[in-house]
Amino acid sequence: MNAMTLIAQNAGFLPTRGSIMIDFVFLAMFGIILILGTSIYLVRYRRMFEVHKWIQVVTGVVLLLAVLAFEIDMRFFTDWQALAEPSSYGMGTVKGLLYFHLLFAIPTPLLWIFVIWHGLAKFPNPAAPSPYSNTHIFWARLAAIGMLLTAVTGWVFYYAAFVA
Ligand code: HEM
């Protein structure tokens, strides 16, 4: 199968070599970061604790389902390496960027599960500041930074693998 047939068969909706699923995740990460920023702004400057809680729970569940769908697609249906093959960076660099991305992409969901679980278990209901606040703020900031770095390294990998 030549490269053009391969790209046509896996055509996503962006004018790149990404598949539908890869394009979707690439774009969705902009939304996730925007929503996360809004949620942190609302809890920090507006003290809207309940709104913050529900934004985090809903984005957490949606992300978990999206990651699951993405993993199934990558493992069983989409040959991303074939799509990345024409990259002018070469497969060595592309794979290096993928491993760098995975450094953040693997621990971050685990951290999110932990932060959401403990938040729900230890804050009062409805959500409000408590003796648990300092612990939450420490781990939740780490979780937020982890998500931001997952997005940024993911975008860089996408560019090198499916655009360049
Ligand atoms: C991955 C999920 C979450 C992230 C990334 C996150 C992020 C944050 C961040 C960064 C802050 C500190 C804002 C500041 O600098 O003042 C914060 C505060 C807070 N979060 Fe979350 N959060 C998450 C989940 C939750 C959940 C599930 C609850 C449920 C009750 C919750 C309740 C709160 C409360 C009550 C505060 C205010 C603490 C205080 O100022 O005393 N968060 N969150």
Image (tube, rainbow, N blue to C red):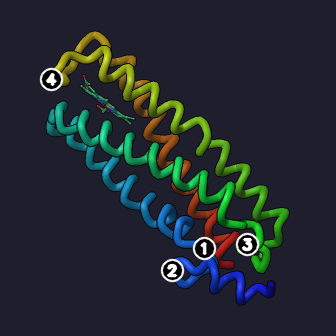
**Where does label 3 land, which residue?**
84
The mark nearer the N terminus, 2 or 4, is 2
Q: Which residue corresponds to the image point at 58% horizontal and 80% vertical from the top-left?
A: 11
The residue type indicated by label 2 comes to Leu
Crowd class of label 2 (few under 14; some 14 to 19; many from 20; radius 10 Å) = some
The residue type indicated by label 3 comes to Ala
Would you say residue 44 is visible in this rendering? no
* Tag 4 and tag 3, C-beta contact below 8 Å: no
At which x and y percent is residue 27? 45, 66
Task: Quote the CA–CA distance across marks 2 and 4.
Answer: 42 Å
The residue type indicated by label 1 comes to Gly
* Tag 4 and tag 1, C-beta contact below 8 Å: no
Would you say residue 37 is visible in this rendering? yes
Residue 103 location, quadrant: top right
Residue sticking out furthest to the front? 76
At which x and y percent is residue 122? 30, 14
Say if 35 sits above or below 77 in the image. Answer: above
Q: Where residue 49 is drawn, which disc sits there?
A: none
**Does residue 48 appear left or right of residue 63 in this picture?**
left
Task: Quote the CA–CA distance across marks 4 and 1.
Answer: 42 Å
In the depicted view, which residue is nearer to us: 160 or 125?
A: 125
Q: Which residue corresponds to the image point at 46% horizontal and 25% vertical from the top-left?
A: 114
Q: Which residue corresponds to the image point at 45% horizontal and 30% vertical from the top-left?
A: 113
Label 3, secondary structure: give it: helix
* Tag 2 and tag 3, C-beta contact below 8 Å: no
* Tag 2 and tag 4, C-beta contact below 8 Å: no
